[in-house]
Amino acid sequence: MPDPLPPTPVPDAPLVRDLSEEALLARIVPLLPRGRATLLPPGDDAAVVTAPDGRFVVTTDILVEDRHFRRRWSHGEDVGARAAVQNLADVAAMGAEPTAIVVALAVPGDLPVDWVEGLARGLAGVCAPLGVGVVGGDLSGAPLVVVSVTAHGDLGGRAPVLRSGARVGDVLAHAGVLGLSAAGLALLEAGRPQDDPTAVAHHLRPVAPLASGPAAARAGATAMMDVSDGLLRDGARLAAASGVVLDLDGAALGPELERVAAAAEVLGSRALDWVLGGGEDHGLLATFPEGVPLPESFRAIGRVRAGEGGAVLVDGRTPGGPRGWDHFGG
Amino acid sequence: MPDPLPPTPVPDAPLVRDLSEEALLARIVPLLPRGRATLLPPGDDAAVVTAPDGRFVVTTDILVEDRHFRRRWSHGEDVGARAAVQNLADVAAMGAEPTAIVVALAVPGDLPVDWVEGLARGLAGVCAPLGVGVVGGDLSGAPLVVVSVTAHGDLGGRAPVLRSGARVGDVLAHAGVLGLSAAGLALLEAGRPQDDPTAVAHHLRPVAPLASGPAAARAGATAMMDVSDGLLRDGARLAAASGVVLDLDGAALGPELERVAAAAEVLGSRALDWVLGGGEDHGLLATFPEGVPLPESFRAIGRVRAGEGGAVLVDGRTPGGPRGWDHFGG
């Protein structure tokens, strides 16, 4: 396969193994934002973060090279941005404002130092504008790159918005995009990234509607979750937790289908499979009581119906096609 | 090298790749303790943990197969216990009570499911007695085992005990053991674990004086840190942060030397190198004002002196031998 996005070769660029752990950390730490909630920044045994609410929200995700990203396609900055976004999306999906992340990183000795600095810049690029601090980390050697981020948030006195709160009659709404990451990945795999650079960019560095999570909570969302494994698969989780059926409005998915239609045509793929089954877009799926004005960036895409808990329908019928993905099989 | 602790072969034992991700999680999650501070346990996008103090302490560490442990020597239960201990030791070193951990785990498909269940049992064995919850996690495939734990704690209204607070004239004290993990590792590497099973057990599954951290804070410790990279190396960090010199009392190290003397004799090694340079014991190094009664399990091992910040001496002189270890070189 041709290399669609060849990294720029840097002669004599220093590698991780050329530096001591402390020297490498000395390059990374200054790139990381302190954050508005950080009382004690990195440098001691642990950091101290404010939790004005008396509670904190916490979630963790791990990215493994050649499983979640390929170094041929993703620069360090892409991987850092993605690691931050997908964790902060889980915080937002609880209705919380993100406050701080910690990052555990394992890297091979022959990785360019610049790649690691890029990772720090990618984390910072997502976190700094939100006031989120990168408050701790750990660094190890490994035969391949592994990035594990743990993200924290504050609920601001609100109840967390769970997956289990959807009620029959609620409006099902979504903020963000659906299927665009899957389209980008398919284009990269086919060696045709130039056919939709927007999709490829979204796959490499997803943009999630992070501010929409707390906004949904304030608007009275009854249930919410991050869509990381695909609309059908994650929707089924919300439906099962709530004991309801989600009935998607096929017509409402039109803009999502249009967005990936060109890529689907190029590759001979079904746009609907990406929109219903594609993961890693990190949009927010939420339910709202009938009549509640949807917060900015949410769009109604269906209804909550009574029925056997866990089903996701499209226009009242069971959809065909792939149902999202699994890390090991299934 | 002979295999000193061969794993018991289990015929037809299921492997990770034989289960879906959800089926694997269904086996692990019930093994994990909920914890006293947990308001919302795993199962949603994120967990919710109490922070009664209005702040939380957070730290993260990553364990990589063949860097931090070998599957030939360490069962899943060992690795789980170690991952919990080394993170909780960092929380304790701030003077905080541990409340909750999250765990990101990457495993190869050919890993026995029993190993992963063992890891969960190892985490639970450390966390449950302390009331610490395992409140979240992530699971991925990878060509080798990687375990990343993020630990949280509550300061109970106290100031965090930093590395930078040691004052000239303070008593330097240590809780836990020194060099025992290094002795155990050396015995394993030499294929002679039977010569000191206690040292080997401590290396595989370190026991840290976790309750001594908050006790030291309450007693008025001026500085504290977890000794994970060796007494000289970590002591130098505390000394540098505080702008002081640490002067170890050689005679006070006697019990530490005695503990590893037999292993040192067997291997022709210097017990002092292990005691001063050996890492991964996860004891606590702290300084206390003169005259303060030391909390239980702390023993005085030296004095804080004036001088060029960052030096660690033994009986007033610069010690020889290795200075702890570094992940990449240096």
Image (cartoon, coloured by chain):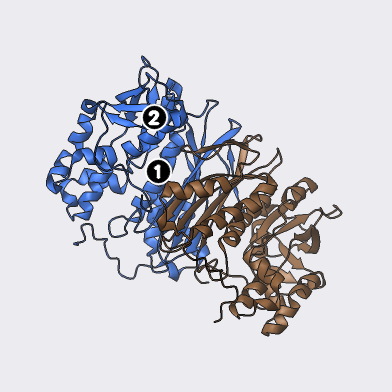
Chain colours: A brown, B blue
Q: Earlier in the sequence, mark 1 or mark 2?
A: 1
- In the image, what residue type sits under mark 2? Ser
Q: Nearer the viewer, residue A314 or A140?
A: A140
- In the image, what residue type sits under mark 1? Gln
User: In the displayed structure, does residue B251 sit left or right of residue B291?
Assistant: left
How many labels sit on residues?
A: 2
In the figure, A95 relative to B176: above or below?
below
In the figure, B113 relative to B118: above or below?
below
Residue B144, numbered circle:
none
Residue B131, given in percent of the width and then of the height, sits at 46, 38
Q: Nearer the viewer, residue B154 or B279?
A: B279
Q: Chain of mark 2?
A: B
Q: Please tell me how crowded label 2 is: few (under 14), some (14-19), or many (20+) other residues with Cα within 10 Å.
A: many
In the figure, B189 relative to A248: above or below?
above
Residue A215, given in percent of the width and then of the height, sits at 77, 49
* Residue B296 shows up from this direction: no
Q: Which residue is mark 2?
A: B212
Q: Which residue is mark 1?
A: B86
Q: Residue at x 43, y 46 (%)?
A: A22
Residue A41, given in percent of the width and then of the height, sits at 55, 38
Residue A187, given in percent of the width and then of the height, sits at 64, 77
User: In the displayed structure, does residue A129 sit left or right of residue B135?
Assistant: right
Q: Nearer the viewer, residue B107 or B319?
A: B319
